[in-house]
């Protein structure tokens, strides 16, 4: 499957299907036939990220400052979430009813999907948010353009940990053993033990930034 313009983001649906964000459209691609089977096209500007929520429900976030919630079987969005004042760059799932998003307005917003509104502004800083991840222990990790990792407690909305690094963090993932791995602007992968708040290992993996 060749895409021109290129795919900007994607999430797998199952072994046969994948959702692709291409400019301001979302395509559901059948891998076996290499052909789009559904098209979702309500966003007005480029789609920066997609997020699987549960079953057939997913979210899309765009440079048009909105998040849309979709049922994969219906080409019309279930709702539009409005609260960011600039492009939305990243999202993470907290549970089936709640997600978090970050953007170029320097905010991390918690959303109640059922009520279709902002539940809480978790953080408002001075630099754009690059990546978010909800951890299994009910905390959220963020990275921003000030080269910092911040870990927030969802119980009291406070910053528990703040660590400066020597390069911006483009991606964050939690490992099965609870450790965290970050992909850096300089191409490094860093493994963290967040219980001890320190680096375990740095892997010089690539020459350029790692996005996923």
Image: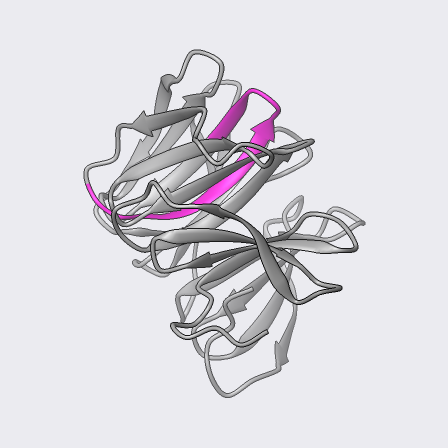
Which segment is the magenta one?
86-99
Rendering coords of residue 135 (x, y %)? 63, 38
Q: How is the image coloured?
A: one colour
Please say if 147 is above or below 87.
Answer: below
Quarter placement of the C terminus: bottom right
Q: Position of residue 88 (x, y in %)?
A: 32, 45
Front residue of 24 and 156:
24
> Which is more toward the observer, 135 or 27?
27
Q: Is residue 112 left or right of residue 195?
A: left
The residue at the point 79 percent across, 50 percent down is 176
| Res 132 seen here | no
Asked if residue 163 is positioned above or below residue 105 in the image, the reply reads below
Against 111, residue 150 (above or below) is: below
Residue at 49 percent of width and 14 percent of height: 114
The chief SS type of the magenta part is: strand
Task: Give me the residue at 68% from left, 47% from top.
Answer: 13
- Residue 125 point in image, percent of width and height: 25, 41
Foreground of the two, 102 or 140: 102
In this rendering, does residue 69 appear at all? yes
State the image quarter where residue 56 is shown.
top right
Residue at 46% over, 76% down: 209
Whether 121 is among the magenta residues is no
Within the magenta stretch, is there residue 87? yes
* Image x and y of residue 173, in percent: 62, 54
| Position of residue 202 in the picture relative to residue 77 (left or right) | right
Question: Height in image: 11 above or below 108?
Answer: below
Residue found at the far bottom of this picture: 207
**Residue extending farthest top:** 115
Location of the N terminus (image quadrant):
bottom right
């Amino acid at each position: 499957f060749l895409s021109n313009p290129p795919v900007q983001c994607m999430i797998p649906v199952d072994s046969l299907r994948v959702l692709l964000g291409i400019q301001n459209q979302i395509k559901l691609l059948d891998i076996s036939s290499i052909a789009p089977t559904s098209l979702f096209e309500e966003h007005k500007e480029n789609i920066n990220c997609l997020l699987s929520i549960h079953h057939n429900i997913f979210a899309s976030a765009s440079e048009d400052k909105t998040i849309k919630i979709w049922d994969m079987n219906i080409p019309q969005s279930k709702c539009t979430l409005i609260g960011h004042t600039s492009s939305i760059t990243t999202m993470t799932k907290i549970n089936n009813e709640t997600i978090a998003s970050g953007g170029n307005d320097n905010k991390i917003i918690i959303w109640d999907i059922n009520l279709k509104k902002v539940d809480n502004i978790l953080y408002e800083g001075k630099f754009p948010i690059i990546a978010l991840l909800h951890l299994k222990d009910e905390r959220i990790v963020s990275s921003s353009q000030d080269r910092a990792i911040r870990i927030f407690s969802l119980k009291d909305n406070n910053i528990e940990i703040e660590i400066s690094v020597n390069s911006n963090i483009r991606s964050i993932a939690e490992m099965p053993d609870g450790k965290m791995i970050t992909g850096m602007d300089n191409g490094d992968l860093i493994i963290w033990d967040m219980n001890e708040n320190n680096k375990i290992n740095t892997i010089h993996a690539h020459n350029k930034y790692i996005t996923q």
